[in-house]
Image (spheres, rainbow, N blue to C red):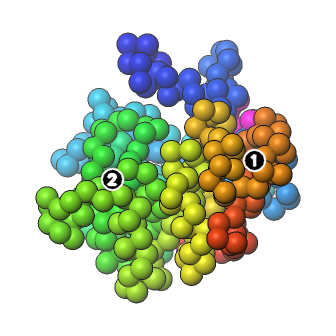
């Protein structure tokens, strides 16, 4: 991501570091600057707020070997863990463990002992097929340890890596759900299209959110399937999935707020004006939301979601009270 010879990766890195106010740091201290910025932002939140820091594992092949050529970036579990331990008042952490690793079960058990609250996957970038039998031993351990799995659903644009988009199909997570794992589908799979695998391997393409909805409406998964609303206020995701999530009050006990930080600080992908045009945000709230965003993008993300309205409904307060879900792990 440091080389202009890879323009897509290079541009993403600049966007992310700019959003995290770490793009102009010299002397190799970008990581420290990034964490300092998060600490500064959370100081602007109500006391009691915490951030869940995500690790990000490397890519692995089906042979269990690390694949450096397809690894976009790597945030070790140990780094996320130690960052959280240094700032326990405001940080918790989530591990990231590729299920094809030969040591995936041991790594998951270690993460559990070290206080990880969940495991994060981004299948399209990491080269993980959630429907593969190669994941079974990981699922068995995750269910046994009561470790939730937070897995991206739908189209992935932020991280390239393997770039196998079909691996983000929400229906591929049925294998984890059937194994008894609590699964959080990130962003409620609110962007892109995937094949309807219930109609076969060559089934028609449907909106990924439609497939997520199918899973959410299955009584079989009502105690194990969740969605997070991070990034759903982005311009590319807001219509029509965001309105439905707001109006589906029966879903609210199974929705978790997330910030997808640093993306709330990437100016082009959010538009308060667009949300006003959709009728999801009141015109009277526009100016103050824009001012908050310039000051604190993390606070902006939270306040924006609290102001969302559709069909006379708003997101329930429990959507923003995620601690019980993660403490249950």
Q: Position of residue 109 (x, y in %)?
A: 44, 64
Q: Position of residue 276 (x, y in %)?
A: 69, 50
- Please tell me which residue is depicted at 56% across the width and 60% down the height of the picture: 242
Callout 2 crowding tier (Cα within 10 Å): few <14, some 14–19, many ≥20: many
Q: Is residue 224 visible?
A: yes
Q: Which residue corresponds to mark 2? A: 193
The residue closer to the viewer here, 198 or 235, is 235
Q: Secondary structure at mark 1?
A: helix
The range drawn in magenta is 32-37
- Please tell me which residue is depicted at 65% across the width and 33% down the height of the picture: 267
In three-dimensional space, the C-alpha distance between marks 2 and 1, rounded to whole angstroms, equals 29 Å
Q: Is residue 328 left or right of residue 295?
A: left
Q: Position of residue 202 (x, y in %)?
A: 14, 58
- How many numbered discs sit on the rendered protein? 2
Tell me if residue 177 comes above or below residue 320 in the rendering: below
Q: Secondary structure at mark 2?
A: strand
Quarter of the image that includes the C terminus: bottom right
Residues at marks 2 and 1 touching, judged by CB atoms closer than 8 Å? no
Q: Which mark is residue 256?
A: none
Q: Does the stretch in magenta take in 282?
A: no
- Please tell me which residue is depicted at 83% across the width and 51% down the height of the picture: 284
- Residue 29 is drawn in which quadrant? top right
| Prevailing SS of the magenta stretch | helix
Q: Which mark is residue 300?
A: 1
- Please tell me which residue is depicted at 57% across the width and 27% down the height of the picture: 15
In the rendered image, the residue lying farthest to the bottom is 219
Callout 1 crowding tier (Cα within 10 Å): few <14, some 14–19, many ≥20: many
């Amino acid at each position: 991501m440091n080389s202009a010879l890879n323009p897509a990766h290079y541009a993403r890195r600049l966007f992310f570091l700019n959003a995290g106010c770490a793009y102009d740091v010299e002397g190799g201290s970008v990581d420290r600057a990034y964490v300092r910025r998060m600490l500064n932002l959370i100081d602007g939140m109500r006391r009691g707020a915490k951030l869940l820091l995500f690790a990000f594992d490397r890519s692995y092949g089906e042979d269990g070997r690390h694949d450096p050529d397809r690894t976009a970036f790597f945030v070790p579990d140990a780094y996320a863990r130690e960052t959280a331990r240094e700032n326990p008042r405001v940080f918790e952490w989530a591990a990231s463990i590729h299920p094809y690793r030969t040591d995936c079960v041991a790594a998951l058990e270690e993460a559990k002992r070290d206080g990880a609250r969940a495991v994060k996957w981004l299948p399209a970038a990491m080269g993980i097929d959630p429907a593969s039998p190669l994941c079974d031993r990981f699922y068995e351990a995750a269910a046994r340890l009561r470790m939730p799995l937070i897995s991206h659903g739908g189209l992935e644009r932020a991280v390239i890596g393997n770039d196998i988009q079909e691996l983000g199909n929400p229906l591929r997570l049925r294998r984890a759900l059937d194994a008894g794992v609590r699964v959080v589908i990130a962003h409620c799979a609110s962007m892109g299209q995937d094949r309807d695998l219930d109609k076969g391997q060559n089934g028609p393409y449907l909106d990924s959110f439609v497939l997520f909805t199918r899973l959410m409406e299955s009584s079989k998964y009502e105690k194990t399937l969740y969605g997070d609303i991070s990034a759903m206020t982005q311009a590319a995701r807001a219509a029509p999935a965001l309105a439905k999530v707001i109006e589906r009050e029966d879903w609210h006990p199974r929705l978790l707020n997330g910030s997808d930080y640093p993306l709330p600080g990437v100016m082009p992908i959010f538009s308060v004006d667009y949300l006003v045009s959709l009728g999801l945000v009141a015109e009277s709230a526009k100016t103050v939301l824009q001012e908050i965003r310039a000051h604190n993008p993390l606070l902006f993300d939270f306040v924006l979601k609290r102001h969302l309205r559709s069909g006379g409904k708003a997101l329930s307060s429990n959507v923003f009270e995620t601690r019980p879900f993660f403490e249950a792990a």
